[in-house]
Amino acid sequence: MADPDRTTPIAARAHRTAWPHRGPARAPRIAHPAEPITTPLPVLGPGGFVIADAPTQPIALGRAAGGRRPGAGAGGGAAMSISSALGALAGLVSWLLAARLLPQAEVGLAAAVVSAFILIAGMTQLNLGLGLMRWLPTAGRYAPPLVWRSLLSIMPLSGLVGLGYVLAVPELARTAAGADGSHVLGTCLFVLAAAGWGAFVIHDYVLVAIGKPWWCVWRNGLFAAVRITLLVVLGTTLGAQGVVLSWVGPIVVWIAAGSLVLAVAVRRFARGACGGTMPCPSEVVGFLGPTAVAQMGYTLLLNQVPLVVILRFGPEAGAAFFIAWQATVVVETAATYFTHSLSAACAREPERAAELVCASRRRLLVVFLPLLGVGALLAGPGLSIFGPQYAAAADVLRVLLLGQAFRLIVVHELAVRTATGRGVAFARLHLTGTVLVLAAVALVPAGDTVVGTAVGTAGGTAGGTAVALLPVALGYAAVQLVLATHVGVLQLRGLGRALPGRH
């Protein structure tokens, strides 16, 4: 029977010098009741913690299940930030090389395939990455089954959804298979990429959760180097198919080798812990439910928009839009990571939540608004690096960056709803923005786009691209303006008073 007087576990400092003898097997010291009880502190070895079941009972000094080394949290955040930066830099370099090596239409076709399988993988991860970050540190001996159940849930789901997607959009399979390849081959390559990328991202979260954060940096850096090398080798000979293979090949190899490494690392982590707990089904559903829906909306926003443009406006116009869209993706990702600290700050000082929210909003705008202004000024020269066809989309990029300025208000509001635990409200705002942007992109009249404007000249084609895509960018900016206005109205009406410390 559970103890009705059970209290919240607390921790007491352990003293290694408490025992007069130096025998090989030291018994844990029982803390005296008069000694101060404090927050968890490292004892008896790296990653150990003292756990007190209740202050009226003997306090056993030992390692908590899944205890982490001191400072692992900070190292994990830095490692994931560096990994994200490496991925963004590798993406920029790879698409710059593709634009230099391949015709614009080939870049557009390859971008459609890559955006599609990343979209599928992101939507079918069910936010299990953050879930594992939450549950693995205390899983202890249950860590291996928790990890493998998660991965064996994601990979089949990603593959199955990817199969349905590629059957609905057969152009993706044709690009992956190449000019002389079979449709079945292209379908298999797309399914492998979707299933593999879903697991690839989860591996990073697992490594951070078990105290191996810097392994993420090395694996992502090596993956980027191999992928870029393969793109140069295969892209020059196979065109768009070479770009796709430069992704699929490393993904398959990294998942096969990484799963073996992960098996050893997770098993060692489990052996080094005492006991452990598995999350109950209600906890899993309660956490993953709203956050997984929000992640789907976020993934749709970043990946489905360029895919719709490529399919509706053609690969030439789609390639120009895809490159411009990457600038908004970089700003969106950086701003989101920038606001992550708000949750931790509000958890540490809940009585100052309102003050912290205002300060974080001010810092976000001070840092990112000037960057967006500089990006708008340098839009033309920046896109010209990719080629004159891409430089014609400079006005498109400027309008997208204007929309991203309004988007900063929305990103901050999303961070506030996360910090205050309003998961349903968080998902609602995310999905509303995604649906409105996709509707704007889908409803913009395609008209006679690039081909109709090109009178046999590159200048005519580029001009037609800019004219055709500008309404898409205006639609995105208009949606972000509406959402930012909605958030501002809510704040003016005082609907954010749920924050502690707000009067």
Image (spheres, rainbow, N blue to C red):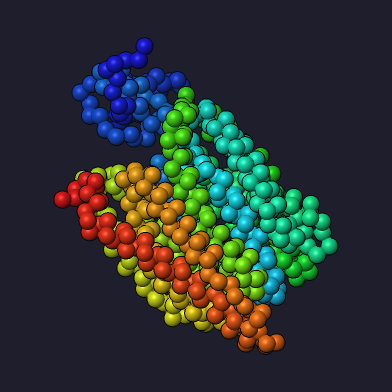
| Residue at (34% x, 43% y) in the render | 421
Closer-to-camera residue (317/378): 317
| Residue at (65% x, 74% y) in the render | 316
Closer-to-camera residue (68/314): 314
| Residue at (67% x, 79% y) in the render | 451
Please give left or right for residue 463 compared with residue 289 in the image: right
Closer-to-camera residue (288/438): 438
Q: Position of residue 180 (x, y in %)?
A: 84, 62
Using the image, determine if residue 417 lies above or below residue 318.
above
Q: Quarter of the image containing the N terminus?
A: top left
Using the image, determine if residue 64 lies above or below residue 209.
above
Rendering quarter of residue 29: top left
Q: Position of residue 391 (x, y in %)?
A: 56, 81
> Is residue 342 shown to the viewer in this render?
no
Q: Position of residue 369 (x, y in %)?
A: 36, 70
Task: Tell which residue pokes out farthest to the left in this image.
Answer: 503
Please give left or right for residue 80 compared with residue 232 in the image: left
Number of callouts = 0
Closer-to-camera residue (280/83): 280
Using the image, determine if residue 24 lies above or below residue 333.
above
Please give left or right for residue 213 compared with residue 348 in the image: right
| Residue at (38% x, 44% y) in the render | 423
> Is residue 150 shown to the viewer in this render?
yes
